[in-house]
């Protein structure tokens, strides 16, 4: 499938915008607290946020005292939302696919990415390109869908359930077969790439990074109790994986 730009599809964009804007959503409740806790001090740092989407993280990093934040994304629609809703003097947005990220002719202290690398066909090359864009001692901190989650190939339900529909356990199918995954999510043919955990680690290490921290998503107990239908799967399988890597 190589490069795709599903976020510029009207139906997909509207659906994602709705989900991302809900008060209770996976990004704000699960992803953001974990990645935030893993970030180095951002004060006066030059930051690149790859796959910045609607700019919520760029705004967060701007408010945390970054010297500058450059948000890049492939989607015009996502960038238009970001420019309108998450602008600040120290934030710039630019349309640029991460496959072409080497076109940036500057270096950064911190490179971040939230839930965008699921769409990367060549993760090894992406890690090398990002390594080259970092200043010495700089950090790459990113999240992506967890390999247990990306293994899903649309064939079986993600969970085995009781007759009432409660999740009993997660189903894992074809984890060992890496590559494209196609299934129905808003659009009929939603596409991501599946890689094993060992592949992620080996790509990061081969690029030259030191892995300082890895996290797998969990949900706070009170949120789980309040929203079991939405987050109940997380006790069986982590949705997201996070890495903090140093050059
Ligand atoms: C799940 S959204 C996450 C957006 C944002 N980082 C956030 O946390 O809300 C994934 C983003 O990755 C972007 N994306 C997908 N493929 C890309 C590519 N090849 N190059 C750059 N951005 C890409 C999408 O356009 C989308 O904005």
Image (cartoon, rainbow, N blue to C red):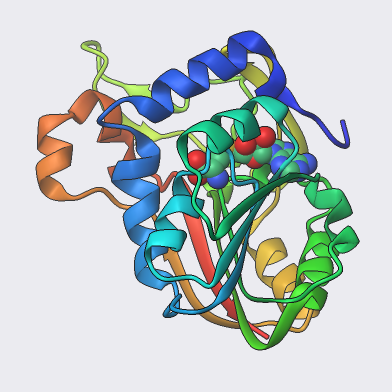
Total tally of numbered discs in the picture: 0
Q: Is residue 46 above or below residue 30?
A: below
Q: Is residue 113 above or below residue 175?
A: below
Q: Is residue 236 visible?
A: no
Q: Quadrant of ligand 1?
A: top right
Q: Residue 54 at x, y = what percent?
A: 53, 36
Q: What's the residue at 59%, 32% (across, down)?
A: 152
Q: Is residue 78 visible?
A: yes
Q: Residue 63 at x, y = what percent?
A: 38, 61
Between residues 53 and 168, which one lies in front from this camera angle? 53
- For the C terminus, give its image quadrant: bottom right
Between residues 233 and 67, which one lies in front from this camera angle? 67
Q: Quadrant of residue 137?
A: bottom right
- For the N terminus, give its image quadrant: top right
- Outermost bottom residue: 137
Q: What's the residue at 19%, 29% (across, down)?
A: 228
Judged left or right of residue 88, residue 191 is right
Q: What's the residue at 82%, 45% (across, down)?
A: 121
Between residues 126 and 105, which one lies in front from this camera angle? 105
Q: Is residue 9 above or below residue 120?
A: above
- Outermost front residue: 89
Q: Residue 207 at x, y = what percent?
A: 79, 77
Between residues 148 and 127, which one lies in front from this camera angle? 127
Q: What's the residue at 21%, 11% (across, down)?
A: 164
Q: Residue 93 at x, y = what percent?
A: 66, 47
């Amino acid at each position: 499938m190589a490069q795709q730009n599903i976020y510029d599809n009207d139906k997909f964009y509207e659906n994602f915008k709705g989900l991302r804007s809900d008060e209770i959503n996976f990004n704000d409740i699960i992803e953001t607290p974990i990645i935030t806790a893993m970030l180095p001090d951002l004060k006066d740092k030059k930051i690149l946020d790859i796959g910045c989407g609607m700019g919520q993280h760029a705004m967060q990093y701007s408010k945390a005292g970054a010297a500058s934040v450059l948000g890049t994304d492939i989607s015009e629609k996502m960038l238009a939302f970001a420019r309108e809703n998450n602008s600040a003097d120290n934030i710039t947005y630019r349309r640029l696919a991460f496959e072409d990220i080497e076109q940036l002719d500057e270096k950064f202290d911190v490179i971040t990415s939230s839930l965008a690398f699921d769409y990367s066909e060549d993760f090894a090359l992406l890690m090398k390109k990002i390594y080259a864009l970092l200043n010495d001692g700089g950090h790459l901190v990113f999240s992506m869908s967890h390999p247990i989650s990306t293994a899903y190939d649309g064939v079986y339900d993600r969970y085995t359930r009781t007759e009432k529909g409660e999740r009993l356990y997660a189903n894992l199918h074809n984890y060992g077969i890496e590559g494209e995954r196609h299934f129905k999510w808003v659009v009929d043919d939603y596409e991501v790439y599946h890689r094993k955990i060992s592949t992620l680690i080996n790509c990061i290490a081969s690029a030259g990074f030191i892995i300082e921290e890895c996290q797998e998503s969990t949900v706070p107990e009170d949120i789980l109790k309040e929203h079991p239908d939405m987050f109940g799967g997380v006790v069986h399988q982590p949705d997201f994986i996070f890495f903090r890597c140093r050059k």
